Image (cartoon, helix red, strand yellow):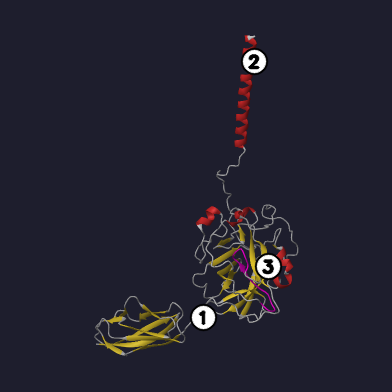
Amino acid sequence: MRTKLVSLLKVCLLLVICAGSQSHITAQDRKSNLPKENAPQNPLPKAAKVETSGGQKTENQAVRGRKRSEPLPKTELSAPTLGDLAPVEREDSTTPKTVDSTRQKTGNLNAAKTAAIYDVGIIPGANGCPPNSEAIEIYMDDEDDKNANSHGGWIGAIVHNRNTTFKFCRVDGANFPTPKDTAYAVLQLNTFCPPNSQPFSRYFDNEDYANENSYTGNIYPSVVRIFPNSSFGLPSSSRLFFCLFLPQPQSTMPSFPDFGIEYGVFASNDLPGILNSGWLHVDDEDVDNTNSYDSSYYSMIGAASKIISGSLNTDINIVKVRSGPTIPKLYSVSLNTSSVVGGSSCNNVVITVSLDAPALPGGQPVSLSSSNSNIAWIFAPKYFTIPAGQTSESASCFMGTKNVTTNRKVTITALVNGQAGYVDLDINK
């Protein structure tokens, strides 16, 4: 009986050991199958990009023959996703870089500070963005082969050559007018479009090969999809969201908000009251082109298609709706005397510079120079400022002179906004 009991205990112990061993093996297998989130990835080498041009181009079908080592099939970007929003900054951008490190770490789509819940993007002109307005760039790498990009008329600060650099200023869209007869659109820069406007989006199938798409600033809800290794034909694209202001017959169509700058919006040239107009033709990717609009566009196609249209490529209409402030011009330069005796550190000379219009906010700098700094030189700093709202200003004790053995003449130059005015002064012995 005792022998049987000992044998039974040995069998039970053996079963427990086997079960524990099997459990350990299963756990190890399960662990080995987990994704290696922190495993380093070897980037593929990026081939040099060479853009070609010239030759007639015809695009009449959405699917064309493969090229460039058989690029992978494209997948449509149906909605903004966190994975699509990895910022890539352009090294040659003149706009201050505004990538938010907090947003990069947390994936918060709207981490950048905004002015209002109805933020929109307008197209700046020659004066740039208003003070305290975020400047935004969206760079789209357009089709390389036989690139057919073109533009005409007023397109503001947008740069359009073989590629397209959209430039926007973030402003509050709450006070944009409701049109009476013709629709217009602005870039959507927050979760909601302003009152009396509706969102829609355009999906741009950008160049696949060695794509260089990038953007600066907080462009949510728009998306730029970037693949660093796209030299191997991986699809790169952009989806831009717009707020469309539909015409209302009862609208009185007040003027567009004054932000103190020259700016424009997206619209056809029959929008009443416009100051200028222009257009862009964007040559999108040729191979397996997947350009598209969302369903909202088609529900408003009569109005929206007058602003943005096209199938395999994209046509965009732009209008200027506000002029910037009048930039004052140099009117006159004068001295309180025509001659001085050399050898004085101040000479009691007073120079007066006048403008043809009041100086803009911030004042109008006037820089001074002498034609012969060996006998008459301008003290540092070599400029003074005409206060904002004033048309003239004077400066005294602005130059020094040396003793001369014979009477000499120097010319003093006043420079205002690139315009030069001249006045002569005799230096006597």
Q: Are marks 1 and 2 in contact (CB under 8 Å)?
A: no
Q: Nearer the viewer, residue 157 or 195?
A: 195
Q: Say few, some or many: other residues with alpha carbon within 10 Å of mark 3 (under 14 / 14 to 19 / 20 or more).
A: many
Estimate the spatial distance between the alpha carbons at disc 1 and disc 2, rounded to whole Å.
100 Å
Q: Image quadrant of residue 210?
A: bottom right
Q: Which quadrant is home to the C terminus? A: bottom left
Q: Secondary structure at mark 2?
A: helix
- Helix, strand or loop for disc 1: loop
Q: Which residue is mark 3?
A: 314
Foreground label between 2 and 3: 2
Between 422 and 355, which is closer to the camera in this rendering? 355
What residue would you read off at disc 1?
A: 325
Q: Amino acid at mark 2?
A: Leu
Which SS does the magenta portion mostly show?
loop
Q: Nearer the viewer, mark 3 or mark 1?
A: 1
Dot 1 amino acid type: Pro
Q: What range of the chain is rendered magenta?
A: 179-193
**Residue 158 appearing in the image:** no
Q: Report which quarter residue 143 is drawn in.
A: bottom right
Looking at the rendering, which quadrant does residue 119 occupy?
bottom right
| Mark seen at residue 8 | 2
Pinpoint residue 350: horizontal percent, then vertical percent: 32, 86
SS state under label 3: strand
Going from N to C along the chain, the mark reached first, 3 or 1, is 3
* First in sequence: mark 2 vs mark 3: 2
The amino acid type found where label 3 is placed reads Thr
Residue found 31% across the figure and 77% down from its top: 379
